[in-house]
Structure formats: C-alpha cells, structure tokens
Image (cartoon, rainbow, N blue to C red):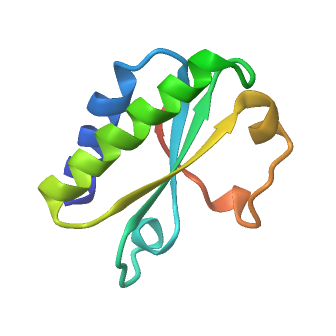
C-alpha cells in the first residue's frame, strides 16, 4: 500500500502551484503501527495571499485522499526558507515523495 499512497500523494500535490517538494515522516514511513500518515509539504515563496490558497488546496487534496484510503493524512506545510532551518527533530528520517 505504501507505493500506492506515495503515488496518490504525488499525483494530488504535484499538480498544485507552489508545491516544491513533499516528504513523509512519522510512524507510517518508519514501518510501524500507525493511525495517520504524516506529510511535510514544502512550498515556494513566503507568506502572502497566494500561500493561503495553496495551503487550503493542499489540505483539501489530502483530506480527500485520507477519506479514500481510510486513514487520515496530516500535512505540515513549510515554506522553503522554513524547511532550510530544519525545524523537525527527525529531519534526517524524512522520506522523499516528490521534488
């Protein structure tokens, strides 16, 4: 199922403007028991009105995907400059999905 979910995430988010890269993290991507799928989405640009609509579109796509697969998909959305600061404790464990 992992490859199918990754492909679905790539398809759904790859078509959105401003999505720079997508990463997986958390129990699902470590191969452990999971209750959700955690996704880190990196977007281009800084905070502006367009970013709000991009974030809304990302959340909508992943909510729909979660309903299809029967498991919630939770996005963490960061700008490229936020991502460069490496804010997650487990940055070295991120699994590339796209980008």
Residue 98 visible in the snapshot: yes
Q: Which residue sits at x=76%, y=66%?
A: 89
- In this view, the residue farthest toward the left is 68
Q: Position of residue 83 (x, y in %)?
A: 75, 40
Q: Is residue 31 left or right of residue 85?
A: left
- In this view, the residue farthest toward the front is 49
- In this view, the residue farthest toward the right is 85
Q: Is residue 89 left or right of residue 76?
A: right
Image height check: is 5 above or below 36?
Answer: above
**Quarter occupied by the N terminus:** bottom left
Query: In the rendered picture of this protein, how many numbered marks are placed on residues?
Result: 0
Image height check: is 31 above or below 81?
Answer: below
Q: Which residue sits at x=24%, y=40%?
A: 8
Residue nearest the observer in this picture, 93 or 16: 16
Residue nearest the observer in this picture, 10 or 19: 19
Q: Position of residue 24 (x, y in %)?
A: 49, 53
Q: Which residue sits at x=71%, y=57%?
A: 91
Residue 20 visible in the snapshot: no
Q: Position of residue 44 (x, y in %)?
A: 65, 20
Q: Is residue 65 left or right of residue 58?
A: left
Quarter location, residue 37: bottom left
Q: Which residue sits at x=27%, y=58%?
A: 2
Q: Position of residue 72 (x, y in %)?
A: 31, 64
């Amino acid at each position: 199922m992992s490859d199918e979910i990754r492909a679905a995430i790539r398809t759904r988010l790859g078509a959105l403007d401003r999505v720079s890269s997508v990463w997986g993290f958390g129990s699902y991507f470590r191969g452990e028991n999971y209750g959700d799928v955690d996704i880190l989405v990196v977007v281009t640009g800084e905070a502006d009105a367009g970013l709000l609509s991009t974030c809304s579109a990302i959340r909508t796509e992943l909510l729909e995907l979660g309903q299809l697969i029967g498991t919630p998909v939770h996005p963490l959305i960061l700008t490229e400059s936020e991502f460069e600061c490496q804010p997650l404790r487990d940055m070295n464990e991120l699994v590339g999905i796209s980008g």
